[in-house]
Amino acid sequence: MKLVYTDVLVIGGGLAGLRTAIGVKRRGLDTVVLSLVPAKRSHSAAAQGGMQASLANSAMGRGDNEDVHFEDTVKGSDWGCDQQVARMFVHTAPKAVRELAGWGVPWNRVRSGDREAVVNAEKITITESPEAHGLITARDFGGTKKWRTCYTSDGTGHAMLFTLGDQSIAHGIPVMERKEALALIHEGGRCYGAVVRDLVTGELTSFVAKATVIATGGYGRIYKVSTNGIICEGTGMGIALETGIAELGNMEAVQFHPTAIVPAGILTTEGCRGDGGVLRDVDGHRFMPDYEPEKKELASRDVVSRRMTEHMRKGKGVKSPYGDHLWLDISLLGREHVEKNLREVKDICHYFLGIDPAVDWIPVRPTQHYSMGGIRTRHTGESTALKGLFACGESACWDLHGFNRLGGNSVAETIVAGMIVSEFIADFCQSGESEISIPTALVREFHAREQARLDEILTSKGKERASDIRRRMEEIMINKVGIFRTGTELDEAVDELQDLLVRSRSLGLESRVRGANPELVGAYRLQKMLKVALCVAVGARQRTESRGAHSREDHPQRDDANWLKRTLTTWKDEGDTLPAVDYEPIDVASMELPPGFRGYGQADHRNHPDTEARLSEVTAIREQLSGADRFAIQNRLMPFDHQLPERYREKNECLEEPVEKTR
Ligand SMILES: Cc1cc2nc3c(=O)[nH]c(=O)nc-3n(C[C@H](O)[C@H](O)[C@H](O)COP(=O)(O)OP(=O)(O)OC[C@H]3O[C@@H](n4cnc5c(N)ncnc54)[C@H](O)[C@@H]3O)c2cc1C
């Protein structure tokens, strides 16, 4: 048995995994990062539009601060998020952007003087102040009150990931590519590392660690059409689920992005609409203002995706051999803007559609994009159920996004969570609490179990093909667990997925090669993907309300009275065909921002019994402290500082709010 010991095992070499590894390494811990692909090819590289942080440098961002970012995030989440986590996040995001700038991310910058921009389909002139010249600028994004999304043209994720990749090298962190974690090693509610397969040789290695971090990204590829890279299969969530102990949170919260190209499903960034692009129907009519007069194309993604689908259902879509679509028009931004700030979009349109978006409209349709749910953690990033297991980034339910994530808040989360969670991991590893003394027999047991599973698949005479089952799963998910959901379709989805899971226990392979063998890989990942899909479908079936991206046509109202709670799913027994479902209440009485209307989308909802009382308390505190500074008011409403690692507690400076340094 090949065995590696380390302090911190990080599974995932995307933004979240790399930033976590850098954080623990800087605290003097030994760490190893694993990735399915070269780390710089992780899916984070695909992020286009930008990263939210309330720097308030540009003219259109003036007046922005952590309070506004917090309110946008909570409303975006449809009150599903953890408000403490949202506060920790908005407070740390400006530090994260500035740290990345220091490491070399070439953020677009403010240039003083006049410049032209398109807002609400009209050209306007924006005047940038001389004191902001050279500072990091920001663009507009959906669901935000201010222009807050920092960007590097439309290649933000690429720039961030390459910078972090270089920083990992500079910090001497070993990043082992083409390594796949197959199972977590655990006993007695404590995680001890993972069994890992080399995707080239097929050899297994067991990694034993004081802390294990899952940063494996989302599960978009359980859907037939997704903007996600093909490695986003959710197997990190699958291995957590297969412990039988770790909980997954809010798996039914699946985001559809309004503007993926048809038919390929590749994303055109929200930055297209943020920069002034509009949506048009079959008649060339700009329809979003009819539905959302306030935010128009820049309502939150869940709302825009639903409005587009509604509009197509009314017969206003453009017919195509690949189904109906709508148009995204960025031609009104002008060639110079498209070629400078949206150049990846231009390339995507050129190579995958054969069109020039500076002139032609882009065929788009809402498509699966992001998973708000994931491994349920505390604010420290540690699993709520399995000690020594941590998660961050898209694979985690920390829970910053609740039932809908705002554009630009995900890459921001990967870095901020990496910064914060790595501090908690380091504290844990440097405390007596983390000491482990496990027998090698335990490691050998897990190692042998994984080897036996692989051998069984390789030698099985089963007749089922993994590719057939997977294709059916993808169709079920897109057709029955999509943007709009109904109880009847969800019942069918759950029944069919269960059937597929049973069938997946009788797989047979054409190729029995032990090393590089895509058929084998597809086969052993399949059950994990099906279990993840079942958590999504079952969570959606049980949740008889509509909240954020979870939209039930048979239960259209947001029902705070019964559903202001997080869904928790676990997989108790290997032979089960359904997850166990439990719920975690969200405490209204301690919310800084009690539930209400988001300002876009549907206006009516059923109140939680505690909402009125908390609203009165919040109003009374605000009246009592009227005239006090915003930090004092915030601190009375919902203190969060004590939850943050000390090094990130300091106030953020911006032009309108200079701060006196405390150290
Ligand atoms: C096209 C597109 C554009 C986007 N644009 C934006 C944007 O502009 N702004 C924004 O905020 N968000 C954006 N997002 C979302 C954002 O990019 C992702 O949510 C985020 O980058 C995820 O980062 P991560 O580190 O959590 O995971 P990833 O970057 O997906 O990394 C996962 C890592 O885990 C590894 N891995 C997976 N499974 C295993 C396993 N079993 N064993 C070992 N390693 C494993 C992979 O190899 C990879 O290294 C976009 C998403 C898409 C699809």
Image (cartoon, helix red, strand yellow):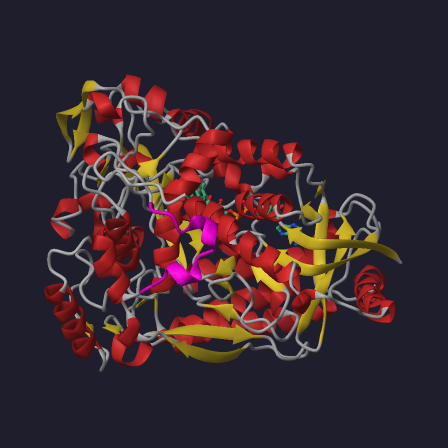
Quarter of the image with the C terminus in it: top left
Q: Could you tell whether 350 is left or right of 656 in the image?
A: right
- Measuring 62% from the left and 70% from the top, which residue is drawn there? 387
User: Which of the two residues, 330 or 47, is positioned nearer the viewer here?
Assistant: 47
Q: Could you tell whether 567 is left or right of 407 in the image?
A: right
Residue 356 seen in render: no
Q: Quadrant of residue 623?
A: bottom left
Could you tell me residue 119's position as x and y percent? 17, 33
Could you tell me residue 285's position as x and y percent? 15, 39
- Measuring 47% from the left and 30% from the top, which residue is drawn there? 102
Q: Could you tell whether 309 is left or right of 293 in the image?
A: right
Q: Is residue 106 magenta?
A: no
Q: Quadrant of residue 60?
A: top left
Residue 652 seen in render: yes
Q: Residue farthest to the right? A: 1
Residue interval drawn in magenta: 639-651
- Measuring 65% from the left and 70% from the top, which residue is drawn there? 242
User: Which of the two residues, 331 or 23, is positioned nearer the viewer here?
Assistant: 23
User: Which of the two residues, 135 or 292, is positioned nearer the viewer here?
Assistant: 135
Quarter of the image with the N terminus in it: bottom right
